[in-house]
Image: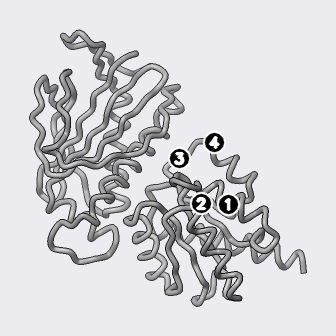
Amino acid sequence: MFPQDTKFLVVDDFGTMRKIIKKILNELGYKNITEAGDGRAAMKHVEDAAAAGLPFQCIISDWNMPNMTGIEFLKACRSNSSYKSLPFILVTAESEQTQIIEAAKSGVSDYVVKPFNAVTLKEKLQRAYNKHNSSHQKAA
Amino acid sequence: MSSAVKKPAASLAVVFHQDIINSFCSGLKETIQMMGETEVSFQKALINSEWKTEGDISGIIEFDAEQFKGHLYIHFPYDVLVKIYNQMVGESNTVFTDEMMDCIGEISNMAYGVAKGKLDPLQLKFSMSLPKVSKTADLNRIPTPHLAIPFMLHQKLCQLEITLIKK
């Protein structure tokens, strides 16, 4: 599982959903959490954090947002060599197969369908961590 | 298909489609039970020819599908919404604040998303829609017969309303 000092970026245009995710992360012991209201603001956070030498270690982002959607944000991260292996979980109210396939093709680490609870998010975090950890081990 | 379609007396092709109504109810129930950890208890549905909505704050989804279009409204009293919000975000607020406005938008969005997921396999393809939030008193009145389904939440009466028009 992600270590307790993992630096998270939570992205959602709804403040309530950001608070819900933050609450669950806090319950899991994570305190280093930054919030953003859309993909564009989130991308700026990602770039600034990397430039400061303190990059984010996991992103949890909503799909449907103004300015830059979650899938656009994911694609932007995956197209940059600095962030292409950053664990990235998409959250959405959609469970359509076509959307899940698009997310998978774009390199999403895992996918959470709303509504969800702490147990579900914890499972997805574990899976995302395992996925990236095992791929790093293979690459090493 | 197991749907029951019934046309009330109206100039518009208003319908009451069992699968759609059940999916909206299930969507709301699952959302509130999962996110608010609170039981939802539905009461007998009513067909309203006039607007008699109870509530303080409403979430509105305007939806469109191949065969239907319409609106989903979810109305809550202030104090119920404060309790759900507290449960969802882990706070202890005692009064309704503007910050809680988007909570009902999220609930509406999730409820509709769950319903949409249940309707897709029935070949009832609904498009995604962004929720709106309004004070219930400020809502535009719907001039067609619509279905009102009262439900109890935290021992208070709330309401789900559905307008469904066949294209």
- The residue tagged 4 is A97
- The residue tagged 1 is A74
State which mark lies toward you, 2 or 4.
Answer: 2
Classify residue A73 by image quadrant.
bottom right
State which mark lies toward you, 3 or 1.
Answer: 1
- The residue tagged 2 is A90
Whether callout 1 and callout 4 share a subunit is answered: yes
* Residue located 71% across and 72% down the image: A86
Point out residue B130 in the picture as x, y percentages from the top left corner.
42, 44
Is mark 2 in CB contact (under 8 Å) with mark 1?
yes
Tag 4: Cα neighbours inside 10 Å, few (<14), some, or many (≥20)? few
* Residue located 30% across and 42% down the image: B60
Q: Is residue B103 above or below residue B110?
A: below
Point out residue A85 in the picture as x, y percentages from the top left corner.
77, 71
Is B121 situated left or right of A87 in this image? left
Q: Earlier in the sequence, mark 2 or mark 1?
A: 1
Give the distance between the C-alpha atoms of the residues marked 3 and 1, in whole angstroms.
Answer: 17 Å
Give the distance between the C-alpha atoms of the residues marked 3 and 2, in whole angstroms.
Answer: 11 Å
Q: At numbered mark 4, what does the secondary structure look like: helix, strand or loop? A: helix
Chain ID, mark 4 = A
Q: Earlier in the sequence, mark 3 or mark 1?
A: 1
Q: Nearer the viewer, residue A53 or B11?
A: A53
Chain ID, mark 2 = A
Q: What numbered label is drawn on residue A94?
A: 3
Point out residue B80 in the picture as x, y percentages from the top left corner.
17, 60
Whether callout 3 and callout 2 share a subunit is answered: yes
Is mark 4 in CB contact (under 8 Å) with mark 3?
no
Q: Quarter holding the N terminus of chain B?
A: top left
Kindly identify the amino acid type of the residue bearing the numbered disc 3.
Glu
Chain ID, mark 3 = A
Kindly identify the amino acid type of the residue bearing the numbered disc 2.
Leu
Q: Nearer the viewer, residue A24 or B70?
A: B70
